[in-house]
Amino acid sequence: MSWFVPAPPSSTGVFTPEHPSHTRLRGVSGRLRRRLLTVNASVTLCVLLLAHTLGGHTASALLGSYTLGMLLLTVQAATLLTSCVWYDRACGTLCDPHVKVLRDAAYGAGAGQRP
């Protein structure tokens, strides 16, 4: 079982019928996670392959003491930070409406009934 899929609500291990927003929420969050992991894994793989291919040339200076290896690591770190910001914004835009539907279904449509 995936870490991201909640355990069945019953102790028998059989899923009870879910709200339709659960399926949409899992689909949207799964696609976003796959995109995030694909982008970061591909950049990491490219940096590793370039470092392996270039060998000792990654120590060659580009701008003063800034080397090619440092440039590769900077690109990797910038990609990681950018993709994390994108993921956070995408979750807020795409997943939050489904979470709101689930909350409203669980606690009723009245704002005073929510904890």
Image: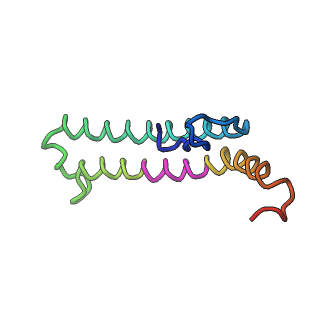
Q: Tell me residue 3's x, y (percent).
A: 47, 44
What number of labels is visible?
0
**Identity of the residue drawn at 22% across and 41% down:** 51
Left or right: where does residue 77 sit relative to residue 90?
left
Q: Position of residue 43 (x, y in %)?
A: 37, 40
Residue 19: image x %, image y %? 73, 39
- Asked if the magenta segment contains residue 88, the reply would be yes
**41 left or right, relative to 85:** left
Figure check: 107 above or below 10: below
Nearest the viewer among 51 and 80 is 80
List the single residue furthest toward the left: 56
Q: Is residue 42 left or right of residue 9?
A: left
Name the residue at 56% across, 44% down.
6
Which residue is located at x 84 percent, y 65 percent? 112
Q: Position of residue 95 (x, y in %)?
A: 66, 46
Residue range (magenta): 80-89
Residue that sits furthest to the front in the current view: 12
**Quarter in which the C terminus is drawn:** bottom right
Please identify the dominant SS of the magenta region. Answer: helix
In reply to whether residue 70 is colored magenta, the answer given is: no
Q: Is residue 112 above or below residue 94?
A: below
> Residue at 78% of width from left, 62% of height from top?
114
